[in-house]
Amino acid sequence: MTAFRYAVLSLALFISALAHAEEVATDSALPDSQKSLEDRFVLPTSDSRILPIKHVLPLDTDGQNAYLDWLKERGFGGMTTNISFDQYLRNEDHWKALRRGVEEARKRGMSLWLYDEHGYPSGNAGGLTMEGHPEWEAKGLLISRTESHGGSVNLDCPPGTLMLATAFPWTNALLTLDAGVDLAKEVKDGKLLWTAPEGDWQVLVITENALYEGTHAAVSLADKLPYINLLMPEPTARFLELTHDAYADHFGEDLGKWFVSTFTDEPSLMSLYMRQQPWSVLPWSTNLPVEFEKRRGYPLDRVLPLLVCGTGPETEKARHDFWRTVGDLVSENYFGQIQNWCHRHDVLSGGHLLMEEATLADRGKSHALSATG
């Protein structure tokens, strides 16, 4: 088809769309539920349009009205907003201003979502959640490993509390767990020094440590703060008490009257390094071993080495069971608590995860980010 024919066809489609838009506009009194999909596509309803995030909503009436006019003029359906970050959650004048802005937006037929955090990732409440509770910080197992075929072994250890320092016989990519050699006494001043007997060995050092340096918490464009542990129920319960309960106190128990959904922003286990580190990492929490044994029927410490290296059915089962338990705990203790709260207050629970936009992430890059080079 020639460029001229393309132009004619495009013009015809544009004129047709304009004509249909005029027809739809004359029938605007029809309830949205009774409009056809075609009509709703031509003239989208407010909740089907883009809702920009507006963290800093003006506090004064004129400023709010000007911003809402600006949204309407540009075809936005409303906004996602929150209480002012200044004196976060603790200034009653700011709550009154937010209430006024939300009421005015709803009068204009706008669709609203409620952003749940001071910056991101969600869960910290601007640092308030973990006040007095440093034990709620995200933790991980840091792992250093090397292979030996006999002779001197010099391995730098990760920081943190030593969980395991062991050498395992290694045959055809299979670990012999019951023949491991305990090397805890060989760890001194951050190094493991050992003379390995002849043979093939996998030498592992695993420590438990807080996850901050090199993680999303440390490189976030918002507040750079230690982050909560999503595997534990207590920090999310406190987060809901500080944030969501405060919105219910100021807007009423039926938040669905004002907002379509809450928006939780980029929660994560912090077990993916954004800046390369000299060790690999797995998510961890003090309650994880107990929950693992309760749900999977055997102790986690028995298979820890298999989470790091090895092949075969036993390794595959251990890794499946580990990540299933991690997934269950995040689902129940973070998302589940938020969803249950939202259900009780007649509002949906929404948001997005860290790096979810990369559906098919580059595996090589991910390995370089999270594992020993």
Image (spheres, helix red, strand yellow):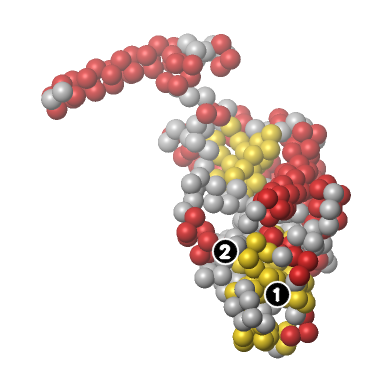
User: Residue at the front extreme?
Assistant: 198
Task: Check disc 1: other Cα within 10 Å, few if <14, some if 14-19, many if 20+.
Answer: many
- 311, above or below 211, in the image: above
Residue at the spot 47% in from the left edge and 59% down from the top edge = 364
Q: Is residue 283 visible?
A: yes
Give the residue at mark 2: 370
Give the residue at mark 1: 167
Q: Are marks 2 and 1 in contact (CB under 8 Å)?
A: no
Amino acid on which disc 2 is placed:
Ser
- 34, above or below 174, in the image: above
Residue 200 location, quadrant: bottom right
| N-terminal-most mark, 2 or 1 | 1
Residue 203 location, quadrant: bottom right
Is the N terminus in the top left, top right, bottom left or bottom right quadrant? top left
Amino acid on which disc 1 is placed:
Ala
Residue at the spot 65% in from the left edge and 53% down from the top edge = 312
Q: Is residue 102 visible?
A: no
**Percent from the top left, x then y, of residue 251?**
75, 38
Residue at the spot 57% in from the left edge and 66% down from the top edge = 371
Across the whole image, how many numbered discs are drawn on residues?
Answer: 2
Which residue is at the front of the view, 97 or 88? 88
Task: Check disc 2: other Cα within 10 Å, few if <14, some if 14-19, many if 20+.
Answer: many
**Percent from the top left, x then y, of residue 270?**
64, 60
* Side (left or right) of 132 relative to 155: right
Residue at the spot 81% in from the left edge and 48% down from the top edge = 296
* Side (left or right) of 16 relative to 104: left
- 95, above or below 104, in the image: below
Which residue is at the front of the view, 260 or 309? 309
SS class, disc 1: strand
Cα distance between the residues tagged 2 and 1:
22 Å
Residue 244 location, quadrant: top right
